Amino acid sequence: MSDTGILPCQSIEALIDQGAIISATPWANDQVQPASLDLRLGARCWRVRASFLPGIGRKVMDRVPDVAMHELDLTQGVVLEKGCVYIAELQERLKLPPGVSARGNPKSSTGRVDVFVRVITDHSPAFDDIAEGYDGPLYIEIAPQTFSVLVRSGTRLNQLRLKAGQPPKLSTRDVGVDLTQEIAGFRGRRHAGVVDMDHEDGHDPRDFWEPLVARRSELLLDPGEFYILASKEAVEIPVLEAAEMTPIDPAVGEFRVHYAGFFDPGFGTAETGSVGSKGVLEVRSHETPFLLEDGQTVARLVYEPLTAKPTRLYGDRGSHYQGQGLKLSKHFKVWR
């Protein structure tokens, strides 16, 4: 056991018991993951004309009136339109003890439908990073990019990692892209319907995605389009570590990879029966077309230690992405 590292599930549950993490509604049984905590949308959401940060000394709700266009009632369920930006309350709030900080990430299923989300806290000069000892509410910025989405109070779009001290980076690993399969990837359709973020296996993927075939093991990325691809290499996260997928240096290509960048301990390991699991890559090209080659490095895995082995590992409570290859989000039926 280490005094510095990412907190495992049993430590997160201890913080909940101590009142360091508080919820406006009863906790869900599956809300605590092996090394992260799922966060849930609250009752109110605002369509805003611009993203913002409150900055040192200011609260989020002090700034909302400056940018809000209208308020939405999430208890009734609402459609968040693609191309728009929203700020929503979360049901959870924090009262972190000294020495404990946190970082937000989109959930895998959120990133795979191209919904960009970030945590915002009072007095913060940065998105997603939550200061040691933070005491206050949590908010989320939501910006659907390719599909409009249906959400409601209780929908889970992002997760929180809690950290003791400043965990060292244990190692890094470059991640390449696999363009050798019969279906090399999927491209989001521009004029698709609405994705219900709480409806699993409930959408026909053909209505939302176009399958792609690579030519000469190459794929031309069009600017502004959203792609789902798979990693060339299998990904393995040891049971005493967690990893974050981070974008590669833009000098190797004008594209962004992986909005949802967190891998739980045990992903791709023998202990969880998921050896050979691939990383799914969410890719968006920027201003210029870019020719992607098979095996090209597109992202980097950064490994960090846990303070202790989790009492539950990745997939112990079931996962749509156990042993995954190229796979769409859990909202879609299997492509056939």
Image (tube, rainbow, N blue to C red):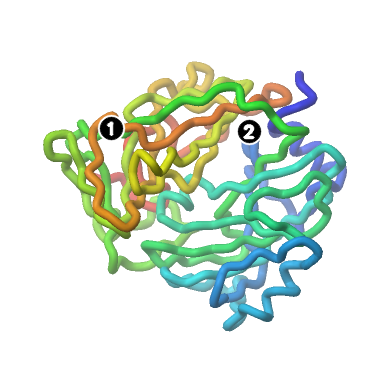
In the figure, residue 152 lies in which quadrant?
bottom right
Question: Residue placed at 58% from the left, 47% from the top?
Answer: 105
- Disc 1 to disc 2, C-alpha distance: 28 Å
Question: Residue placed at 73% from the left, 56% from the top?
Answer: 92
Question: Residue placed at 54% from the left, 35% from the top?
Answer: 244
Give the number of callouts. 2
Q: Amino acid at mark 2?
A: Pro
Q: Nearer the viewer, residue 210 or 330?
A: 210
Frontmost of labels 1 and 2 is 1
Q: Considering the numbered disc 1 on the image, is that residue within a helix, a strand or a loop?
A: strand
In the figure, residue 29 lies in which quadrant?
top right
- Looking at this rendering, what residue extends furthest in the top direction? 270
Question: Residue placed at 25% from the left, 40% from the top?
Answer: 292
Does residue 16 sit above or below 288 in this rendering?
A: above
Q: Could you classify mark 1 by the number of other residues whose Cα lies within 10 Å: few (under 14), some (14-19), or many (20 or more)?
A: many
Q: Nearer the viewer, residue 195 or 121?
A: 121
Q: Which residue is mark 2?
A: 34
Q: Position of residue 299 (x, y in %)?
A: 42, 36
Does residue 206 sit above or below 253 in this rendering?
A: below
Q: Which residue is mark 1?
A: 178
Q: Which mark is residue 255?
A: none
In the figure, residue 232 lies in which quadrant?
top left
Q: Position of residue 323 (x, y in %)?
A: 40, 29
Q: Quadrant of the N terminus?
A: top right
Residue 79 visible, this orientation: yes
Q: Amino acid at mark 1?
A: Asp
Q: Position of residue 114 (x, y in %)?
A: 42, 56
